[in-house]
Amino acid sequence: MTARLPSSLTRPFLRLVGRYRGLRENALRHFCRRVVSLSTVPARMRLRRTGRLRILIDSSVRGHSITHKSASISTGVEKWGHVDFETGYAARIPVHSPTNDTPTYNEVRYLGGIAYLAKRGALDLFYSAELRAEQFRQPTGRFRGYGYFDLGLFNDVKFTNIDGELHLDLHAPEDAQLTRVASCSDPLYRSLLKLLGQKHSLDAYHIYTAEKFGMFYFLHIDFKLGNLIAQHASKPVLANLKTKVLTPSQLRKLLGLLPIDTNILSYKGSSFSVHPELHWDMQARSRQGSGDKPKTRA
């Protein structure tokens, strides 16, 4: 037989539970902010000496900055009359497990610190017209999240445009962009294109744009591009660039950033259920309704 509280004690007990949960979540949000702040202390000390850095952010970084997804958490099967139905609630859970040892997750662990430095005014983050065009022709959720509880580390960070806006072709945006970029006759762009190859024509144009507008860094999480840059690093066209083409893990070596596991960031800006102990089964983002399910952390 299940024991129940007297009705006179039910409301006070529920208020007490609600207050405890509120205090606990406030403490966890404060802990999250504190960890991120401490992880950037060496970088902030260096940036006080060197001044603010200008960084052009690639679409690959924006995509990987969505570190949490909205999940449906099952609470079991209940009876509704004679019908069984699944019960549950919505919550935020990390995409990755903190035990993930893939190259991608190694890069993602530095994005929280980079976003924090940008919000503190230590870094200036930029986008270009062609980067905006590149993101326009892809699903919006890739860069902003698909669900209400999704967490995008750069969603509350200000980005500045460096070269104006474009009138985008709504019918064939990819073809229009590739044609537009191919028409660029600047010697630097043509040299980068020859070095990186036609498949990386947009990457070549983004690097050219970063150099043209005086960016310190072009930040990406594209391992094919990274391998090409490493392979040809001694070639004059790359060696003479003032803009350095880096991944977040390479940038952290210059700034002294410390990594942050994304489950620690789970309570950032939350006012709803959060499960930092879970992660997505495939440990990769996919479109909503793809069949991927939450999984208990291994």
Image (spheres, rainbow, N blue to C red):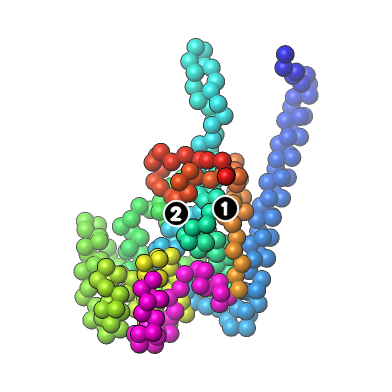
Where residue 29 appears, x then y in whole percent?
66, 52
Few, some or many residues within 10 Å of mark 1 (<14, 14–19, 20+): few
Mark 2 or 1, nearer chain start: 1
Instruction: Examine the structure image and report whether residue 170 is included in the region drawn in magenta.
Output: no
For the point 40% across and 47% down, the residue is: 286
The residues bearing labels 2 and 1 have C-alpha atoms spaced at a distance of 25 Å
Q: Is residue 43 visible?
A: yes
Give the quadrant of the C terminus.
top right
Quarter occupied by residue 271: top right
Amino acid, disc 1: Thr
For the point 47% across and 80% down, the residue is: 216
Instruction: Examine the structure image and report whether residue 243 is included in the region drawn in magenta.
Output: yes
65 above or below 58? above
- Of residue 228 and residue 276, the one placed in the foreground of this image is 228
> Label 1: which residue?
99
> Label 2: which residue?
144
Where residue 197 appears, x then y in whole percent?
27, 73
Few, some or many residues within 10 Å of mark 2 (<14, 14–19, 20+): some
Where residue 1 appears, x then y in whole percent?
72, 13
For the point 63% across and 62% down, the residue is: 36
Tell me the magenta residue range.
227-255
Q: Secondary structure at mark 2?
A: helix
Where residue 137 appears, x then y in whole percent?
30, 57
Report the label total. 2
Q: Is residue 145 toward the left or the right of residue 110 in the image? A: left
Amino acid, disc 2: Arg
